[in-house]
Image (cartoon, helix red, strand yellow):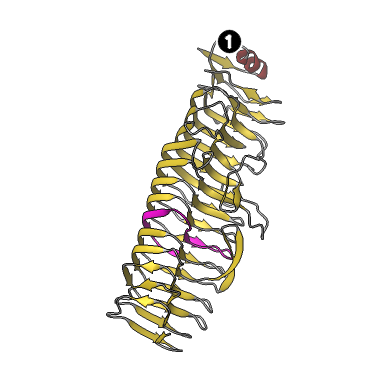
Amino acid sequence: MKIPIHSLIDLMTALGNNTPANLVLQTSILCPYSIVLPVGFSITGLDKERCIISFNNSDGIGLTANNEIADLTIQTNPNNRAIYTLSNHADLGILSLKNLVITGQVQILTRAGTSKTTLLADNIDIVACDARRYSEQPQKYGVNVYQGAFTVYNFNSTPDSVINATLTNISLGRKGAPVIGSGLFICGFGDNGGWVIADTITTGDIYSNGMLPYGQPDMITAAVFIVNGTKIKNITHKGAVTTYGVNDMVLDTWGEVEKWIAEKPITSYGPSGIGFVNFGIVDEFEAKDKIETFGLGARGFNQYDGTVTKATFHSITTHGDGSIGMQFSKAVGSIEVKNGVVTNGAKGQTLVKGVLMSLPADAISIKPGGEIRQLNISGGITTHGDNVHSFNVEGGVVHALKIKGDVTANGNNSIAVAVTNGGQTPLTNIAAISKKGIAVQIDKGKVSDRAGLTAKGAKGNIVEH
């Protein structure tokens, strides 16, 4: 049953009916208080250009079960929730969000008592949001995470509780006017229960700023954060993904992703913002355009925990001190960079698992515990800062290595290739050049194959201890 809505009085009268109905806005309406859609109700507009429902003092529209919101512009204050769940039914049925322009947060958060929810969201554009006020935050690896402008959060710890989601065409913020907090935030309760399972996630442009103060080590945000308790089949970013803040990752996961593709640039402007950081299990990742970071300690790619089976990158460029290009602390499969890795900085502070540390802006760093089955780099490896390493195997293991182009260190006392601390790697057909330092340094490390290795360093070609 369709009920045309011409005024706030019409809306409140219709919501008081016992029979589920589709409430069709004919015009714009201002609500001085939040409204709740009863079970089975939907609210839509004739078109989202002329049908704006706004809330000047409160949150916006509460969902209970089997609700739909479509073809509307919804406006709250940016730090309020424009759409939220308000129910503890065991099964929330299908919650459908379609063709919406929103100011404020979308927060689909289920709690104890709700064991099953299906969320379908398509063509959602969140213009502005500040998602920092909510106390439900995941905690792991020494950090808390702010919720996002678009949040899907299973806060029920029961192992068999699940939100099944399909999210398509999600856009957040504007260039130069990012949403505040995280952007797209998908989170289960933990590693052992309370799941979010998504078959498809696609996004347009995403711009976010965590608004965290510099030096705060135990809070992070991300433009796209796939937190633990999540199982995602496919993620595709069809637009640019950009962060501006401190500890503001661009892509971050603690969960499981089968296939993850970024078609446009991945960019971080803030200190300690990482282009792609993986603590989870990723089968296949591909960045078809550049990853570039500008802030102090802002790294390109980090493998801290879990693993990635196959990762392909267009290129990685960092500009700040302490901004490592690629760092590996766990075992991974095949890693390929098609257009080179470049760092411009020297030594500087960067956030590592909730602790600020001082690190050199090495281009590639393989730490103890880091292991790469196959590493292929086209376009060479280049560092410009002083006292850094271009290719640094500092305790980790590289089983197969292929580098097209030179491994070059341009800065004072910078080393092109270092194999130290029990690290192991072949250096087959590697051309190592250090313009103001040592070309190849081997100190308590093992080089499994030196065939075709050439080294030219101002302070030594190959130095072994």
* 64 left or right of 204 in image: right
Is 246 placed above or below 72 here? below
Q: Quadrant of the C terminus?
A: bottom left
Of residue 166 and residue 372, the one placed in the foreground of this image is 372
Residue type, numbered disc 1: Asn
| Residue 303 within the magenta-colored segment of the rendering | yes
Q: Is residue 43 magenta?
A: no
In this view, the residue farthest toward the bottom is 459
Outermost residue to the top: 18
Q: Residue at x 34, y 68 (%)?
A: 378
Q: Nearer the viewer, residue 360 or 236?
A: 360
Is 28 placed left or right of 372 in the picture?
right
Task: Give x and y (percent) for residue 174.
Answer: 56, 47
User: x and y percent of residue 385 in the render?
Assistant: 52, 76
Would you call the spot at circle 1 few (<14 residues within 10 Å), some (14-19), or many (20 or more)? few
Residue 281 place in picture, x, y as percent: 42, 49
Does residue 313 appear in this view? no
Residue visible at 45% across and 68% down in the picture? 365
Secondary structure beneath label 1? loop
Q: Is 436 displayed left or right of 37 in the figure?
A: left
According to the picture, the residue beneath numbered tag 1 turns out to be 18
* Residue 309 vertical placement versus 190 (above, below): below
- Left or right relative to 216: residue 154: left
Q: Nearer the viewer, residue 64 or 88?
A: 88
Residue 73: name its quadrant: top right
Q: Which residues are the magenta region?
A: 292-316
Looking at the rendered structure, the number of numbered marks drawn on it comes to 1
| Residue at the (65%, 18%) spot, across then down | 7
Does residue 181 appear in this view? yes
Q: Position of residue 22 (x, y in %)?
A: 52, 17
